[in-house]
Image (spheres, rainbow, N blue to C red):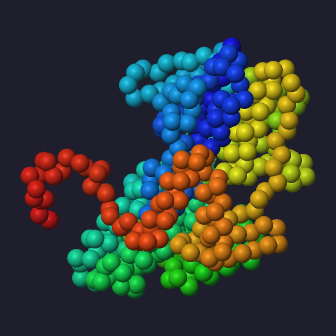
């Protein structure tokens, strides 16, 4: 019985465990997954969670409900010592401890890349986790409530100013969804008008969405601007101290909500705390069959995939090309990993990972989207339907698909749920204050 240990239960890790459960007999391997969250996050749904179109829980796939044979350890791996075949695990409730293994799968993903810009750590929020998407939604709703009791002026303007820093996939999708939500919210706030809203998307490069080609990229900028947004291309965030945004193009404004979507960095457990081989970006070096190492120097008993691995992209036919870090690849790499590990345990040959991109599809807000596959570009409502169709098919398990479909159906009839539950973050306030908040 081999002990298989999976580090990280996101896309690639969850799929590896799920498929290994199906492929291996109980007596062949003992499966363990170490993941700080009790669920796998379906990140492509986070922009819709932020926009209130999908219930937060439905973007999370419970590990314990779906991984019936895998031991789930709620913790962070802080170190991988492959020479000793052990990892160090950190949890909240006991001193760090070691877990041994015979074979390791490293699928810890990437982390949000922050830069030392004044005010960012204190004021901004990321959009990689469910709690961040929920907080973004609640902060916007609360800002509307607060702004609605103010006279027009700088404070009201500040509350209704939203800034996204980073015009990649998650930034553009989140920005488009939030703009759509804010515009729709105005119907419920007769005290406020469209001219009170101020939405800024800041991107250091001279174009957004590097995943699509130039023409469609320009179309996305135009369509956001037609909806009243400011898109600052070739501009960097210089500071955000106390929510006062200063851009390198000279523009300055106060912003209540600053969302940081300026890219990913290597996961520190992989880039700093392991003896497994990494490249200059801190990604694990893997062969085409996802075993760690190179063809000349494979590392026995170590496998990796997803955003923390530099996976050769055989489909593009260019030597040295690597797969793009996205869900499309992570899911399929997880499945290939499971197949290759099962083959290895049974003494059979492995197969290389090969996947031709299915194109790019993104939501830009309710009823708006963009799809590109080679020369085919579809924009607007049809692309948005394709986005929803693709992702509801892609989210793992039928149970999640049904819940998400019901969320969308529910929003279609009575509209989005516009209640802010920001107060759940301080549940004892009412108990402590006796019902009357402090005067300003
Ligand atoms: C807002 C947003 C929208 C996106 N939309 C799309 C899209 O439309 N299409 C698309 O293809 N891609 C999309 N992506 C990208 C896609 O979600 C990622 O590429 C994909 O999740 C990568 O999978 P992964 O398994 O490598 O990492 P993840 O899914 O990030 O999983 C890594 C897991 O490891 C855990 N972990 C981290 N460190 C440790 C540790 N030290 N110990 C134990 N566990 C650890 C984490 O908690 C996490 O659960 C989007 C991403 C975001 C943020």
Q: Is residue 99 above or below residue 341?
A: above
Q: In what quadrant of the picture does the C terminus appear?
A: bottom left
Image point 47% across, 71% down: which residue? 412
Q: Is residue 112 above or below residue 152?
A: above
Residue 266 visible within the image: no
User: Toward which corner of the image does residue 290 lie, by quadrant?
Assistant: top right
Q: Tell me which residue sits at (43%, 78%) in the image.
A: 183
Residue 110: image location, x then y, percent: 61, 44
Q: Which quadrant of the figure has residue 295?
A: top right
Quarter of the image that includes the N terminus: top right
Q: How many marks?
A: 0
Residue drawn at point x = 82 percent, y = 67 percent: 374
- Please identify the quarter of the rendering in which residue 416 is found: bottom left
Q: Does residue 374 appear anywhere in the picture?
A: yes
- Residue 297: x and y in percent read 85, 26
| Image coords of residue 146 (percent x, y) | 26, 71
Task: Name the foreground residue: 207 vs 50.
Answer: 50
Nearest the viewer among 157 and 36 is 36
């Amino acid at each position: 019985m081999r002990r298989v240990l999976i580090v990280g239960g996101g896309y690639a890790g969850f799929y590896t465990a799920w498929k290994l459960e199906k492929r291996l007999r109980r007596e062949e391997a003992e499966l363990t997954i170490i993941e700080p969250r009790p669920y796998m996050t379906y990140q492509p749904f986070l922009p819709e969670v932020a926009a209130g179109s999908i219930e937060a829980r439905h973007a999370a796939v419970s590990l314990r409900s779906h991984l019936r044979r895998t031991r789930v350890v709620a913790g962070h791996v802080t170190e991988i010592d492959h020479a000793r075949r052990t990892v160090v695990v950190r949890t909240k409730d006991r001193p760090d401890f070691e877990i041994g293994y015979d074979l390791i799968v490293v699928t810890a993903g990437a982390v949000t890349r922050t830069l030392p810009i004044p005010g960012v750590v204190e004021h901004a929020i990321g959009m990689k986790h469910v709690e961040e998407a929920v907080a973004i939604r609640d902060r916007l709703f609360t800002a509307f409530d607060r702004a609605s009791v103010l006279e027009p002026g700088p404070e009201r303007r500040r509350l209704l100013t939203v800034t996204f820093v980073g015009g990649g996939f998650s930034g553009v999708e989140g920005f488009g969804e939030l703009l759509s939500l804010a515009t729709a919210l105005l119907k419920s706030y007769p005290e406020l008008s469209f001219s009170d809203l101020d939405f800024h998307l800041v991107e250091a490069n001279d174009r957004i969405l590097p995943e699509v080609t130039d023409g469609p990229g320009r179309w996305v900028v135009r369509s956001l601007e037609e909806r009243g947004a400011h898109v600052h291309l070739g501009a960097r965030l210089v500071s955000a101290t106390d929510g006062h945004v200063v851009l390198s193009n000279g523009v300055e404004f106060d912003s209540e909500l600053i969302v940081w979507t300026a890219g990913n960095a290597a996961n520190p457990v992989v880039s700093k705390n392991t003896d497994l081989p990494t490249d200059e970006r801190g990604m694990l070096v893997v062969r085409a069959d996802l075993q760690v190492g190179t063809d000349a120097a494979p590392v026995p008993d170590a496998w990796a995939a997803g955003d923390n691995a530099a996976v050769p992209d055989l489909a593009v036919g260019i030597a040295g090309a690597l797969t793009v870090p996205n869900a499309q690849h992570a899911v399929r790499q997880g499945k290939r990993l499971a197949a290759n590990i099962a083959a290895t345990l049974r003494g059979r040959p492995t197969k290389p990972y090969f996947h031709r991109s299915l194109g790019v599809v993104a939501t830009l807000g309710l009823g708006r989207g963009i799809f590109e596959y080679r020369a085919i570009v579809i924009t607007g409502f049809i692309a948005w339907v394709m986005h929803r169709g693709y992702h509801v098919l892609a989210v793992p398990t039928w149970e999640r698909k049904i819940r998400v479909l019901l969320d969308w159906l529910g929003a279609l009839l009575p509209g989005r749920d516009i209640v802010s539950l920001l107060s759940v973050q301080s549940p004892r306030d009412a108990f402590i204050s006796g019902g009357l908040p402090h005067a300003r």
